[in-house]
């Protein structure tokens, strides 16, 4: 009665987005779903992986499919905050300064290779992410709604990167890793069309009104006391266990819950189950939780460890 | 330390906690045991601390053995034995230190902690005062906190709070049991186990002899001699003569308790206005008990001699408490047997010749005993001064020296010389030592008599009057008798001079409050003996006559209280009300677990269902229904009562292997 509701709810624009995106990014349906859940939970998304696995493709595909206007900012080491926010230019005809909005003024901002830019430029973007507004020349300008940042970054050990500080990483609801495609998907990719062409032909699968509606539905999914007990038990465990360098923040707990709600909705359920929390836990917690020096040795996966060491109450 | 395996017990911080607790518990012994014990203990603890800090190895076995042998030998050398309070405690402290050095495994750590608890007990052999009791409670807390740390396992060491809080909670849980044991544990008449002889060293109090200068040593002591609680009005201070040893035998310098032990009678020809009171005597190691003149009743386990000196059968080694009645207006001993008359008149003719001559001269010149008494009192009144620090009387005739040269003295000088003068003049006389006055605590109306209140006076026997009290000191220094020793001498020592400066009487009130607290503690905690216990239990409505019954009651109460505390703890840890859906679900999972499909603790219901469906399709349908109901009940909007019953019924019917097997 609860389990097969997904089939009953279809066709549904969210599923439509997922299935169409899966045709462009092959063999990555789970990552696409998680990205979609992130957007439905109104969180910003960070995609981290080596170059060439489709980070940019995924973000571009999502932007197009969601029917939102989007702009892309390629972050480089010489990028200035004004390149992100915009700049006031003297207009001779009216003899006034006119503000030329930067690429941040759009519903979806693709911040490509965010860790190649200097901290100054990074912080311009990250502040806008947090406050949903931009202040330039003493004037505060609101950003459009909905507003998302999908940022991509290279793994930190690559040359020429400025790692994001932990406080700024915390502003991303999820951090996804795409990983290499499996053999079948890779073969298809090699045989198939150019991805850029595919994206340029993508038609929006939903409009912004539908998106806002879906976001509202996500926040309306049922969260029982028993589920809150579970979320609290998870968070509490990170704070008392000696295996983690630092416990999860209340913001992280909230992020976990919101993402789980969106995930539950995408599963076609009205209520959030521990499985939903577990599904989003690795991507929500992964960039926030680290093992201590000792436990980090030997490929310690903090989020996987957390998942198996807390019983469902 | 020596192995490569992580050993939680020997984690640096755990070892440091243990060492700190050990130092804490052993610290009070530093003043009681020889210095070398403290030095040895401190060195070993420091050594062990360094071993833990630098993660180096414990000393080799032969060295530990050698040190242990040396410690035992040193104890033997110092005390000539290893038993007794001081030697035993010394040995225990040294062995505890050696145990620290030897400590390698968790078991030995726990053993060391328990040694710490034994060290706590040894402290009570020396003092059972309130501050020591509080201090020892802190020690126990520290040791339990150390134990808590050891049981936390490897990993992040618990913080101070994480150690102290659970330890404190554990101790609080033990309080009801402690009370039960305290109230019901069978007390034995007298000390349960005899305290070693050396435990009584250093008790202060009156002695059974008096030489010039012996009482004034006591005056330096602020220690409590006894406490008195009066029923009704308190007699005037000038009548509070607390009778102690009566000294008849005199050798020219020293007055002594005679060897006679004739029992006394307590028939007084005129006995009116009895005063009733309860006395709590601090241990003084001798036999005598104190009462106002003259005693009308005898405490249990005490006798009275012919000279009205009350004696306890057993030495007063523990604090004892007795009820008394006394008659302040009395006439007694009107008939004096000849042996006592002879004793009351005897003195050594060759000693103190000038004093003896003076007494004889008065006898010749006076019409009767009353006149002789008056002449002596006038002499003291006119020429003598009262001082706490009289010059030492060094000659063989000390009372001659005092009466004719020094003329400054303390109560024992006046009492001794007065009695000698009377004897020389043919009046039977004896010296009575004891205490005079006391300090009234306004908070609990209890009279506190200190060693400083020690006093000596004279009794003379007059024809047709019997024995009457004459206090020659009162004519020299009337203040001494009317308002106590402090007003006669001015402040003595640091604390009294602080009190003298204390205009608002804050310090005085604090001292009174502290003393009132001590009195209650002595009475109800330390003085909780067989009688008190019986009385207390009778008030509770329990008539418990013998210790066997008491032991049964104790066992029952311990089981009951322990059970209640345990039950409370178990109930606290249970979820307040278990969700019936969870009960059903747990049963469902248990049934499947019985058939080999075990749900992992972190496995969600849908994941588990998927596994069940895959592994055992025969039960898939029913499992789906149960899971669906459970999920709705637990994570959805809830289910109706009917659905709840349905869920339970389904779980009850559910067979893990399928319906046909």
Image (cartoon, coloured by chain):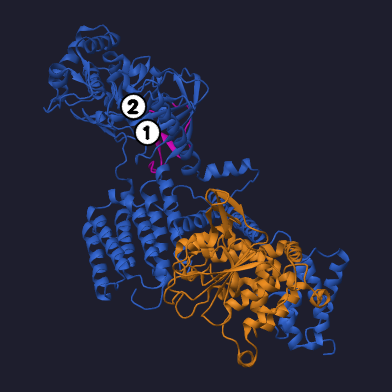
Point 30% across, 16% down: residue? B474
Predominant SS along the magenta part: loop
In this view, B302 is above or below B4: above
Point 24% across, 53% down: residue? B34
Residue bearing the label numbered 2:
B453
Q: Is residue A156 left or right of residue A305?
A: left
Mark 1 falls within which chain? B
Picture colour for chain B: blue
In this view, B335 is above or below A246: above
Letter of the orange chain: A
**Number of on-image labels:** 2
Q: Position of residue B310 (x, y in %)?
A: 40, 33
Residue extending farthest front: A93
Residue bearing the label numbered 1:
B225
Residue extending farthest left: B395
Q: Quadrant of residue B119?
A: bottom left
Instruction: Determine the secondary structure under disc 1.
Output: strand
Q: Nearer the viewer, residue B628 or A47?
A: A47
Q: Is residue B656 left or right of residue B461?
A: right
Placement of the C terminus of chain B among the 4 image quadrants:
bottom right
Q: Are dots 2 and 1 in contact, CB under 8 Å?
A: yes
Q: Is residue A137 left or right of residue B537?
A: left
Q: Quadrant of residue A10?
A: bottom right
Instruction: Determine the secondary structure under disc 2.
Output: helix
Q: Position of residue B71 (x, y in %)?
A: 25, 64
Label 1: how many Cα within 10 Å (few below 14, some 14–19, many 20+): many
Q: Give the mark nearest the N terminus, 2 or 1.
A: 1
Q: Which residues are magenta?
A: B295-318
């Amino acid at each position: 009665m609860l389990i097969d509701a997904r089939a009953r709810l279809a066709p549904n624009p969210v599923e439509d987005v997922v299935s169409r995106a899966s045709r462009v990014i092959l063999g990555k349906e789970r990552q696409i779903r998680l990205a979609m859940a992130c957007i439905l939970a109104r969180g910003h998304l960070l995609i981290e992986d080596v170059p060439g696995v489709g980070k940019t493709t995924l973000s571009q595909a999502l932007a197009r499919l969601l029917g939102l206007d989007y702009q892309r900012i390629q972050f480089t080491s010489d990028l200035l905050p004004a390149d992100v926010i915009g700049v006031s230019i003297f207009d001779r005809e009216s003899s006034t300064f006119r503000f030329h909005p930067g690429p941040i003024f759009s519903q979806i901002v693709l911040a490509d290779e965010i860790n190649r830019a200097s901290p100054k430029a990074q912080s311009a973007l990250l502040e806008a992410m947090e406050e949903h507004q931009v202040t330039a020349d003493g004037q505060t300008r609101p950003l459009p709604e909905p507003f998302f940042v999908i940022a991509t970054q290279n793994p930190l050990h690559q040359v020429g990167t400025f790692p994001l500080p932990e406080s700024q990483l915390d502003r991303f609801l999820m951090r996804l890793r795409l990983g290499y495609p499996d053999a079948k998907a890779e073969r298809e990719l090699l045989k198939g069309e150019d991805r850029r062409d595919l994206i340029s032909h993508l038609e929006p699968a939903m409009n912004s009104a539908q998106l806002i509606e879906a976001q509202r539905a996500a926040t309306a999914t049922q969260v029982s006391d028993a589920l809150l007990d579970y979320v609290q038990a998870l968070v509490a465990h990170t704070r008392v266990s000696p295996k983690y360098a630092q416990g999860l923040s209340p913001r992280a707990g909230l992020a976990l819950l919101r993402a789980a709600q969106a995930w539950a909705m995408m599963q076609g359920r009205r209520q959030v189950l521990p499985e939903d929390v577990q599904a989003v836990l690795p991507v929500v917690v992964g960039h926030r939780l680290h093992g201590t020096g000792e436990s980090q040795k030997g490929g310690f996966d903090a989020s996987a460890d957390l998942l198996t060491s807390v019983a469902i109450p | 330390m020596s192995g490569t395996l992580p050993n939680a017990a020997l984690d640096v911080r755990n070892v440091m906690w243990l060492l700190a607790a050990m130092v804490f518990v052993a610290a009070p012994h530093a003043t009681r045991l020889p210095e070398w014990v403290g030095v040895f203990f401190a060195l070993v603890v420091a050594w062990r601390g360094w071993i833990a800090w630098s993660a180096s190895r414990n000393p080799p076995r032969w060295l530990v053995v050698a040190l242990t042998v040396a410690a035992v030998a040193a104890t033997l050398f110092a005390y000539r034995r290893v038993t007794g309070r001081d030697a035993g405690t010394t040995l225990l402290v040294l062995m505890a230190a050696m145990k620290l050095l030897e400590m390698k495994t968790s078991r030995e750590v726990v053993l060391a902690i328990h040694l710490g608890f034994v060290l706590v007990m040894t402290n009570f052999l020396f003092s059972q005062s309130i501050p020591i009791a509080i201090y020892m409670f802190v020690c126990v807390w520290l040791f339990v906190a150390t134990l808590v740390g050891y049981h936390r396992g490897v990993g992040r060491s618990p913080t101070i709070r994480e150690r102290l809080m659970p330890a404190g909670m554990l101790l609080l849980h033990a309080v009801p049991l402690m009370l039960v044991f305290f109230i019901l544990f069978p007390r034995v008449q007298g000390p349960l186990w005899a305290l070693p002889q050396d435990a009584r060293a250093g008790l202060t109090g009156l002695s059974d002899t008096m030489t010039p200068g012996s009482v004034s040593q006591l005056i330096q002591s602020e220690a409590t001699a006894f406490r008195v609680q009066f029923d009704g009005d308190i007699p005037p201070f000038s009548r509070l003569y607390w009778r102690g040893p009566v000294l008849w035998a005199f050798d020219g310098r020293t007055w002594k308790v005679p060897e006679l032990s004739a029992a006394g009678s307590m028939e007084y020809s005129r006995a009116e206005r009895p005063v009733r009171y309860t006395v709590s005597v601090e241990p003084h190691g001798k036999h005598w008990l104190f009462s106002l003149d003259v005693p009308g009743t005898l405490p249990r386990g005490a006798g009275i001699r012919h000279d009205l000196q009350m004696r306890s059968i057993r030495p007063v080694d523990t604090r004892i408490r007795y009820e008394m009645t006394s008659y302040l207006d009395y006439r007694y001993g009107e008939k004096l047997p000849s042996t006592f008359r002879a004793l009351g008149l005897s003195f050594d003719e060759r000693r103190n010749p000038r004093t003896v001559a003076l007494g004889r001269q008065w006898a010749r010149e006076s019409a009767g005993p009353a006149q002789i008494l008056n002449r002596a009192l006038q002499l003291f009144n006119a020429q003598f001064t009262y001082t706490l620090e009289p010059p030492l009387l060094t000659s063989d005739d000390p009372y001659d020296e005092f009466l004719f040269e020094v003329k400054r003295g303390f109560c024992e000088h006046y009492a001794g010389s007065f009695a000698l003068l009377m004897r020389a003049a043919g009046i039977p006389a004896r010296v009575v030592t004891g205490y005079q006055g006391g300090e009234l605590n306004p908070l609990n109306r209890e009279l506190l008599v200190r060693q400083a209140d020690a006093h000596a006076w004279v009794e003379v026997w007059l024809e047709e009057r019997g024995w009457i009290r004459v206090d020659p000191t009162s004519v020299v220094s009337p203040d001494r008798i009317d308002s106590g020793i402090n007003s006669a001498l001015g402040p003595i020592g640091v604390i009294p001079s602080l009190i003298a400066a204390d205009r608002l009487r804050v310090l005085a009130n604090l001292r009174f409050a502290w003393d009132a607290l001590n009195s209650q503690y002595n009475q109800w905690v330390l003085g909780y003996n067989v009688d008190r216990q019986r009385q207390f239990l009778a008030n509770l409505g329990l008539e418990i006559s013998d210790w066997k019954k008491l032991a049964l009651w104790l066992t029952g109460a311990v089981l009951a209280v322990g059970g209640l505390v345990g039950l409370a703890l178990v109930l606290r840890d249970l979820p307040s009300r278990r969700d019936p859906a969870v009960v059903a679900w747990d049963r469902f999972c248990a049934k499947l677990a019985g058939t080999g499909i075990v749900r992992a603790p972190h496995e969600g219901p849908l994941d588990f269902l998927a596994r069940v469906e895959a592994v055992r399709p025969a039960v898939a349908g029913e499992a789906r229904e149960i899971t669906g109901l459970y999920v709705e009940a637990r994570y959805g909007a809830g289910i109706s009562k009917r659905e709840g019953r349905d869920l339970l019924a389904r779980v009850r019917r559910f067979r893990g292997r399928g319906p046909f097997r």
